[in-house]
């Protein structure tokens, strides 16, 4: 079945909105992008980047991430200099 670019765009949006961290979900999106890359690659890329811009980072996520080794070293050097 051959879809027009608008239908392809709408299907990609639906896939992206259901995207999760599972391998199957990621594989579905990648397979879709590969399948339609020759027909409308620029439109698909624009759709992906637009959806990525809509995603907001979770504020609590930054509190959960451990401090990097460099920030610990910077802190130690700053403490020693003062």
Image: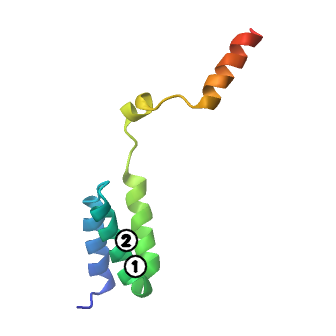
Other-residue count near label 2 (Cα within 10 Å), few / some / many at <14 / 14–19 / ≥20: few
Q: Residue furthest bottom?
A: 1
Q: Is residue 57 above or below residue 23?
A: above
* Res. 70 mark: none
Asked which quadrant contains residue 38, the reply is bottom left
Q: Is residue 49 above or below residue 21?
A: below
Residue at 32 percent across and 61 percent down: it is 23
Asked which quadrant contains residue 22, the reply is bottom left
Distance Cα–Cα, label 2 vs label 1: 6 Å
Left or right: 59, with 18 as reference point: right
Q: Residue furthest top?
A: 82
Q: Nearer the viewer, residue 9 or 65?
A: 65
Quadrant for the N terminus, please. Answer: bottom left
Element type where label 1 sits in the image:
helix
Element type where label 2 sits in the image:
helix
Residue at 33 percent across and 63 percent down: it is 26
Quadrant for the C terminus, please. Answer: top right
Q: Are marks 2 and 1 in contact (CB under 8 Å)?
A: yes
Other-residue count near label 1 (Cα within 10 Å), few / some / many at <14 / 14–19 / ≥20: few
Q: Position of residue 28 (x, y in %)?
A: 29, 70
> Looking at the image, what colour scheme do you see?
rainbow
Q: Which residue is label 1 attached to?
A: 34
Q: Is residue 66 above or below residue 26?
A: above
Q: Which residue is label 2 attached to?
A: 30
Q: Position of residue 80 (x, y in %)?
A: 73, 11
Q: How many marks?
A: 2
Q: Position of residue 29 (x, y in %)?
A: 33, 69
Asked which quadrant contains residue 73, the reply is top right
Residue at 41 percent across and 62 percent down: it is 50
């Amino acid at each position: 079945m051959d879809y027009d670019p608008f239908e392809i765009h709408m299907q990609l949006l639906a896939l992206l909105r259901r995207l999760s961290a599972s391998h199957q979900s990621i594989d579905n999106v990648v397979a879709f992008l590969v399948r339609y890359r020759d027909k409308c690659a620029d439109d698909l890329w624009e759709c992906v980047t637009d959806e990525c811009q809509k995603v907001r980072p979770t504020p609590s996520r930054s509190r959960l991430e451990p401090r990097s080794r460099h920030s610990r070293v910077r802190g130690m050097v700053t403490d020693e200099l003062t």
